[in-house]
Each structure stands twice: as structure tokens, then as C-alpha cells.
Image: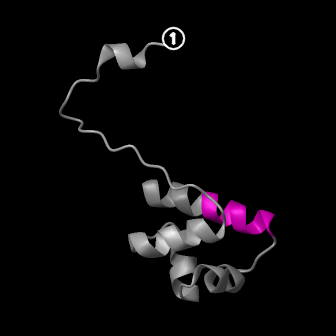
């Protein structure tokens, strides 16, 4: 699901700029196939993903959590 969500955001950003997949790949310094696979929601290398997001001026932001640990209730409260 994560890769699909990333692919949708990248495709939306590319289309907003009116770039083709080929143009995105050239600007990012990745192959056309790599750019296409990322947009299609297929797992790719982190390096290719970072290059593509940088070319689109997007910020790649992840929060990694351990599902075995309970959430800190203080962190879920609004200030």
C-alpha cells in the first residue's frame, strides 16, 4: 500500500508540471523504466525514489513505528 500511495503522489506531481515520464526520468537521473515503476506503485530502490522526489521538489517523509509497542497516550493528545 505504501508504494501505491507514493506512486499516486508522484504521478499527480508530474502531471501538475505537465511532464512526461521520460522528462521526469531525465530530470531525476533515473531510467524511464524506474520512473514508470515508481509511479505504478511497484517497489523500487530508495535511491531512485529519492531522485524522483527531488526532481519534483517533493519531500519524502516517513515515520517508522514498532507495532509491538504501545503508543504513548500523551503523544496522541492535542495541545
Q: Tell me the quarter of the picture where residue 15 sits.
A: bottom right
Residue 61: x and y in percent read 48, 50
Q: Residue furthest left?
A: 68
Count the marks.
Answer: 1
In the rendered view, tell whether residue 27 sits above or below residue 53: below
The residue at the point 49 percent across, 68 percent down is: 50
**Which residue corresponds to mark 1?**
79
- Magenta-highlighted residues: 9-17
Residue 31: x and y in percent read 54, 88
In the rendered view, tell whether residue 57 sits above or below residue 47: above
**What predominant SS class does the magenta segment belong to?**
helix
The residue at the point 45 percent across, 70 percent down is: 42
The reply, left or right, for residue 43 in relation to residue 57 is: left
The question of residue 10 being in magenta is answered with yes
Q: Tell me the quarter of the picture where residue 57 sits.
A: bottom right
Quadrant of the image containing the N terminus: bottom left
Q: Residues within 10 Å of mark 1 (few under 14, many from 20)?
A: few
In the rendered view, tell whether residue 72 sits above or below residue 12: above
The question of residue 52 being in magenta is answered with no
Q: In the rendered image, is residue 1 in sight?
A: no
Dot 1 falls on a residue whose secondary structure is loop
Residue 58: x and y in percent read 62, 58
The reply, left or right, for residue 58 in relation to residue 73 is: right
The reply, left or right, for residue 48 in relation to residue 32 is: left
The colour scheme is one colour
The residue at the point 74 percent across, 80 percent down is: 20
Q: Nearer the viewer, residue 74 or 5?
A: 74
Q: In the rendered image, is residue 48 in sight?
A: yes
Amino acid at each position: 500500500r505504501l508504494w501505491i500511495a507514493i506512486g499516486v503522489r508522484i504521478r499527480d506531481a508530474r502531471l501538475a508540471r505537465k511532464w512526461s515520464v521520460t522528462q521526469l526520468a531525465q530530470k531525476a537521473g533515473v531510467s524511464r523504466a524506474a520512473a514508470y515503476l515508481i509511479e505504478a506503485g511497484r517497489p523500487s530502490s530508495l535511491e531512485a525514489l529519492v531522485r524522483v522526489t527531488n526532481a519534483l521538489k517533493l519531500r519524502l517523509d516517513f515515520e517508522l513505528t514498532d507495532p509491538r509497542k504501545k503508543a504513548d497516550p500523551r503523544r496522541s493528545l492535542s495541545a
